[in-house]
Structure formats: structure tokens, C-alpha cells
Image (tube, helix red, strand yellow):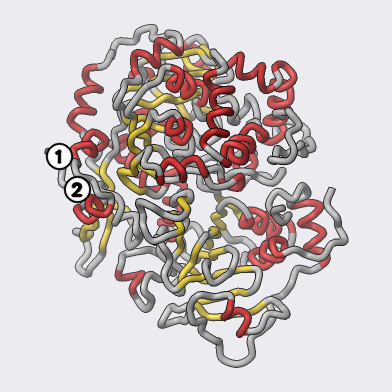
Amino acid sequence: MAKYLYNEEAVANLRLSDTSVLDRLVDFESARAAHLKKEHAKKDKRMSLAEAVATYVQDGDIMTDAGFSYVRTPHQAFNEVIRQGKKNLQMIGAPNTNQSFFISYGLVDYSHNSYTGAEMRGIDKSYDRALKAGKVKILSEWSHGGVAQGFKAAQLGTPGVCSKQMLGSDLVRYNPYLQVIQNPLKKDKDPVVFVPALYPDVAIIHCHVADKYGNGYIYGPAVNDLAVAAATRKLIITAEEIVPENDIRYNREGQIIPFFYADAVVELPFGAVPGNMPGCYYWSRQWWEKIMRFGGVSDENMMILLNEWIMGTKNQFEFVEKLGGAKWIAEARRQTKAAEGDNEDIDFSYEEYTLKHDSGLYY
Amino acid sequence: MRDLNAPANPLETLAYIIAQQIHDHSIVYIGTGIPMVAGILAKKTHAPNITIVYESGGQDPIEGDMPWSVGCPFTWRKSPTTMEMSYSFAQCYNGYVDMGFLGFAQVDMYGNVNTHMIGKDFHKPAVRMTGSGGNNDLSSLTENMVLVGLQSPDKFLEKVDFITSVGHLTGGNSRREAGLIGNGPAAVISPWGVYDFHPTSKRMRVKSLTPGVTFDIAQQLTGFELLKPEGDIPDTKLVTPEALKIIRTDVDPRGVFTTMPT
């Protein structure tokens, strides 16, 4: 028996027989209890990636995608989640492009979908196949802004926000969490969408630096991660570098996740590979082209690639070696510095991966 | 290096036509793909003082190479600030964004957009696509929207398979009554024509057509009855040799978005 009242039209359209599966994402009471119960003392929370994932990512969890698809996304920690074979996950995020990798391994039962794909590099044919085959079921359809408002509502400390997004669209007919209500301030009819505060179970957020307590600093677009960090029941901070607390106190300004949100701190250089880490390294364009184009052809193709890159590597260092090692690091660093205007412009030409042409290069 | 002498392809034509919609000194919200080319082209030609905003939070970047994503470094290159996603969309709600540009897979006679799926059954679509991303948010909030895509009877439909983003909903005053903000779509642009919406019925209407395209051809490329404007239909102003050169040498020299797929 579900704890909350859901949008009945959406429940029917999505053919959800047991709506209790929807509860935890909006269960403020249990999220608050989890926040009260977690370690509030300022303690050293450093541990290995394997230990952090084993301890804090549990079967059945609602997990978030983070960063922006291929920008500051914790790809290497996600790979560890896959290697450990976590099961029955729900995925949410804006975007949630990277749920597709978990779905390929059958680790995800449910998706709260906002956007799955790689923009100009195309629609995600693996996701298309998985949905049609019933490997994964959509529990709710969102816009990016809707998910962002749900996380932000949690960070604001409110039951939800009234939004003008998604009104009138089929999203509200395929999202059990959304209710269209009257703006109480208005004399005339003025529909708004009540977007409830969203509380995922676990988030992994990749930061530029963190201290051992979990204060994490982000450079470049934070996207939704500051709000997600406040909302989530469990938080793993991974960072390119662990620094002394005073480095954060004296040298870092702007986008900081406070230590008391964090349950685990993992030093993970190259943690966003093969995506882009602002200030650190560029994304591997060919890797993503290979995933979308070669992997897009069939599930078999996709598993060949994923087994090679995820199961075939023990950690991020082996992954970087496969991309080209020190040469890749130098190129990727040069590219991101140039892209951000922190170095001379360079020629961004490269040998694009196509089904007919594989240069074998990843930079 | 791109062939500078080749005639303009439909994507370059599209980019140019979109760019013509952009007024100097305005704030424009840009989605991924061709709109990026158009925004940067406008900035490098007739509208050097526009401010471009992207959904992952980039604000007013200094132009560099063509962005490959709305989150990539070129969308926030030396931006004075980057905004969290919720705040980024809020700029449209709060009235700071003059115009938004988005793509579509399907559009209907009232400018409603589908980027979710092809097919009638949500559980067994012919093709599942990306979902909304920021498409719905911009369409729900932005003062004026310009929709960009390819045109054929299975893309310009009487009814889209899934309403990802509301345009003029069911026409007339229905967009306002549904509670949405802004004027909704001002234009739909395809390589073959520029369309606007009838002021009261809000049905799609021909505004101008690419030279060589007649009303009848445009109608044949459309899955619903197009409205005809009063008087002669003007030709869409085609990409000038100067603008084409700027696209190929300066805006998108590697043809990321403006070479035809092979």
C-alpha cells in the first residue's frame, strides 16, 4: 500500500500495479531520519572506491546520475557499481544519459526519465531496445527543469515547489509525482504543477578537490549536484585530489558541498574519464562515438564494448591506459585548457570514429 | 578543411535562416545542434551584442570551437558565472530571456513538440527517443520560441505522438488557459520554409518559403492543412556567400553540425 497520493491518470498510463515502488523518492520523513542518523561528527571518511560502493550503494537504491552526461560525471565510480553487480536500482537525474550502462548490465529495474542520449551523437538505441524488451520500466517522465526543481525543493527545505514547467504536456500524464493544482494566490484560474521534493537514496558526486571530511569543491557547472548532495540519503564524494582542509578554507570559493552531507570520501584521479573534467581533462570523443555508433547497433555490440572497458579494467588507471596513457592525459589536459580559454586555442580536429573508420585513437 | 565553393546545404541554409531571427542586444537560450550554429553565426555577423545562455548553466561564454554539448566547456568558456540548472531555466520564467531555440523530431499544427517517441503506444513505441531534456522547460517559460527541424509529412503532423513540450496546445487561448508562460512558438523553421502561427487560431501558417518551394510543395511536405498568408508568399532570404563563408571558416569549420550526415 503506497504511502502517498499519486496522479492516478499517470499511474494508469504507466500501468503501475503497485505504487509503493514510487514512495521512497518523495519520502521526506525517511530522508530526514537518514540525515539525522548519519555521522555528524567531523571525521576522516576516506576509504577505497570499492569499500565506498560496497557500503553505500545497496541493491534497490534510487541512484542519481550526476554532472551533465559526460561532464564531471562519476563514470569510474559507476563502473565500480557495475563491477560489484548492484541490483534492482532505480535511476534518476537530469540528464540521465548514464543509466543506459547500468541497464545494459540489467542492474536497473526502474527509470525516472528526463533525457537519455548523447545530443548530437544521437539517440541511445540501447535504451530504446531495453525499454521495448521490458528490461527496464519507466516510473516517471520529467523535464530537466522538473527534476532540477525537485532536487532544489529538497535543498530549500520545502515539501515541493509550484512550477510552470510541464503544464499541459504529456509529461504530467506520465508522471505520478506531479499534480496540477490552482495557484492559491490567484483569483482567476491559474494552474501550477506541484513538484515534490525529491530524495534519492544514493548519489556519487565527483569533485575537483575534497578534504578527508568530505568538503568538496566543484569548478565549472555544478548542474544539479549541490541540490542532490543536500537531498540524498547517502553521499559518496569522489575527488581528483584530496587536499588539506585549509586548502578548502583558504583557497576555494563558490561551489562547495559541506562535509556533513558526505558519508564517504574517495580519492579518485581521473574519476570522470572518459568524460570531461573541467580544468583537468577533455572528454574522449571517439569513445563516446564508439558507444553510440558501434554499441548502438546491437546489444551484443554494446556488451563487447562495455565488457572491454568496464569489466576489462580494474580501475581508472587501467582505463586511462587503454585510452592512450600518458599521451592521452597530455592531449586531454591541453584540450580542456584550450576549450576553457585557459591556454592558446588549438585545432580541435580529430579522426572521428565511424562504423567504417576506427583510428584506434581516443584523443 | 571544408569545400568553400560547394553550394549551401540544407543545414547551412537552416542555420542562416534561424540566425536571421535573432535581434542584436537580446538574450537567447540555445539548445544543442543547429541552434548553436545559428546563435554563434548571428553573434559573428549582424548581432554581435547578444548574450547566449545554455541549460547546463553557461552564461555569455567567449566563443571558441563549436560546442558538442550544452554542457561542454565552450558553453561556459570564461563565463562570468555558471548557474545551477534550476536557476538557468528560471531566467526564462523571470523574463530575462527574449528568445529560445530548440529542435524537434515531430511538430504539430499548433507548434507542440515531440522528442519522446515515434509511435502511438508508450509501452511499445516504434522508436524511443531522448525524452524532454530542457525542451519542455524552455517551451513552457520562454517569451518567444523558435522551433527548428526537418520537414516531411511524418514530422509535421496534425497530432504529435507525445506532447513533450507545449506550443499553442489546441490553439486559440489554450496555452494561456493551461497556465503556461510566454507567447509560445513564434516560428517553425525547416530547410523548406519559415512558418508562423495565425494570431487567433494559432494554427501554423506559411510565412516565407525557400526559393523554388511553392505553397503546394510545402503542403505536400506537411501532414496537416497549412494556412496560407494574405497576398504573395515571400521567398526566404537565402544564405549569402559572405555568411556561408563565415559558417565554413569561422563558426563550424569542422562541420560538426552543418555537414550532411553520410
Three-letter code for the amino acid on which mark 2 is drawn: Tyr
Contact flag, marks 2 and 1 (Cβ < 8 Å): yes
Question: Regarding mark 2 in the picture, which secondary structure is present there?
Answer: loop
Q: Percent from the top left, x then y, of residue B63?
A: 69, 46
Categorize mark 1 by other alpha carbons within 10 Å: few (<14), some (14-19), many (20+). Answer: few
Question: Which residue is painted at 36% across and 70% down in the image?
Answer: B175
Question: Which residue is painted at 71% across and 20% down in the image?
Answer: A324
Three-letter code for the amino acid on which mark 1 is drawn: Ala
Q: Residue furthest bottom?
A: B231
Are the residues under marks 2 and 1 on the same chain? yes
Quarter of the view holding residue B153: bottom right
Q: Percent from the top left, x then y, of residue A139?
A: 30, 43
Question: Height in image: B163 above or below B235?
Answer: above
A36 vs B65, left or right, is left
Residue at the spot of label 1:
A2
Which disc number belongs to residue A6? 2
Q: What is the CA distance from the residue labelled 2 to the residue labelled 1? A: 9 Å
Question: Height in image: B158 above or below A245?
Answer: below
Q: Residue furthest right?
A: B5
Q: Percent from the top left, x then y, of residue A117?
A: 51, 43
Question: Regarding mark 1 in the picture, which secondary structure is present there?
Answer: loop
**Subunit under mark 1:** A
Q: Residue furthest front?
A: A300
Q: Nearer the viewer, residue A250 or A62?
A: A62
Quarter of the view holding residue A322: top right
Categorize mark 2 by other alpha carbons within 10 Å: few (<14), some (14-19), many (20+). Answer: some
Question: Which residue is painted at 72% across and 53% down in the image?
Answer: B262
A231 vs A253, left or right, is left
Question: Height in image: B172 above or below B71?
Answer: below
A332 vs A310, left or right, is right
Q: Percent from the top left, x then y, of residue B192?
A: 65, 73
Question: Height in image: A193 above or below B14?
Answer: above
